[in-house]
Amino acid sequence: MSDPIILITGGNSGIGKAAAIKFASQGAKVLIAVRNPERGKEAISDIRKKSESNTSSMLTMDLSSMNSIRAACEEFQKTNTRLDCLIHNAADFDIGRKMPEYSEDGIEKIWATNHLGPVRLTKLLEKELARSDKGRIITIASKGLMVHPFLKVRMDDPEFKKGGYSVEKAYYQSKLAQIMYTYWLAEKYQKTSITANCIRVTNVRIDISRYPNISPIAKKLYAWKSKYSISPPQMAEVYVWLATSPEARKYSGEYFDEKCRKVSSGKYSKDPKNIHELMEITGKYIPELLLEK
Ligand SMILES: NC(=O)c1ccc[n+]([C@@H]2O[C@H](COP(=O)([O-])OP(=O)(O)OC[C@H]3O[C@@H](n4cnc5c(N)ncnc54)[C@H](OP(=O)(O)O)[C@@H]3O)[C@@H](O)[C@H]2O)c1
């Protein structure tokens, strides 16, 4: 197969950008999907410089907006007939947010961006993934879920319309949903060449200047936490391994840590009944999924 075509969301910062640099250095054609074109252009210039390669480009895509995802996919399809790897790396985790915010589609933003966005994007690029020799889908969850062993998806109220909202709860719910969605995808594509796996991201240093509204205490907490965190390029190694290594081709429906080891996501997330229920409620937002039956 020729050099892989890789699409990574949120490739303008942090782990996504570090992974994009590594992919481009290896000669892959990498597209970063970004919601802000200015930040995207800056990132592309940096990725090209650091990778010493011109194989990266940008797609504008706001994952919280159904129209924006559709438009970006149409743009992608104008010049690409196949996609070898789709990495759902972007996530909304605005730690300074006190109240729920809503997308232009009127959906709570974290649920829209971190769960519904990836589901819609995969669905729209399904044909291109199927045209690859081995289309790989990679979703991203969080080691922080281990601190919430009894967490469940609020099947009757994923948008916290009945109250009880916090950014943490909404974020971890969305990450749990992504793990369950990965198992659903792996099962769905079982008899095809497409695979789906999830990465459990550990504590990775973040650029705290991206969150100007957080309290001085939270800033101090993050400064302390960063001492025990790995760097974005270190975490990006797992992305590269899962996206491009021949060894990782054999896996589907697995959950990997920062050392590329298989880890368990817990009983609740693996229960087929819970996965079915999650995808039923997801299908209410994305009717194309319900039509698949
Ligand atoms: N860092 C950690 O310790 C940690 C721990 C566990 C899991 N993770 C996961 O690892 C992944 C990467 O995180 P990171 O540490 O690299 O964080 P980051 O630097 O904040 O990257 C997040 C990316 O998501 C993008 N994004 C947010 N909302 C979006 C939207 N509506 N549409 C399109 N893009 C959007 C951001 O774009 P803008 O630049 O426009 O904001 C940014 O590029 C995320 O899935 C995160 O949940 C990170």
Image (spheres, helix red, strand yellow):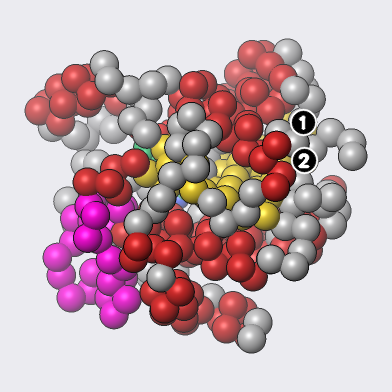
Identify residue type, mark 1.
Answer: Ala
Image position, residue 227 (x, y; %): 26, 16
Q: Which residue is mark 1?
A: 28
Q: Earlier in the sequence, mark 2 or mark 1?
A: 2
Mark 2 vs 1: CB contact within 8 A = yes
Residue 159 in magenta?
Answer: yes
Relative image position of residue 39 (x, y in whole percent): 52, 31
Helix, strand or loop at label 2? It is strand
- Decide if residue 31 is in sight here: no
Amino acid at circle 2: Ile
Relative horizontal placement of residue 79, taking residue 235 as reference (left or right): right
Q: Where on the picture, by quarter, is residue 42?
A: top right
Say which residue appears at 23% left-offset and 74% top-offset.
161
Examine the structure image and report whether residue 232 is included in the region drawn in magenta.
no
Quadrant in the picture for the C terminus: bottom right
The magenta stretch spans which residues? 148-172
Q: Could you tell me which quadrant the N terminus lies in?
A: top right
Front one among 196 and 231 = 196
Q: In screen coordinates, is 107 left or right of 51?
A: left
As drawn, the label of residue 5 is 2
User: Which residue is pictured at 39% across the width and 53% down the height?
Assistant: 265
Category of crowding for the residue at label 2, using alpha-carbon neighbours closer than 10 angstroms: few (below 14), some (14–19), many (at least 20): many
Circle 1 — which element?
Answer: loop
Give the percent coordinates (x, y) of residue 45. Answer: 64, 21
| Ligand 1 placement by image quarter | top left
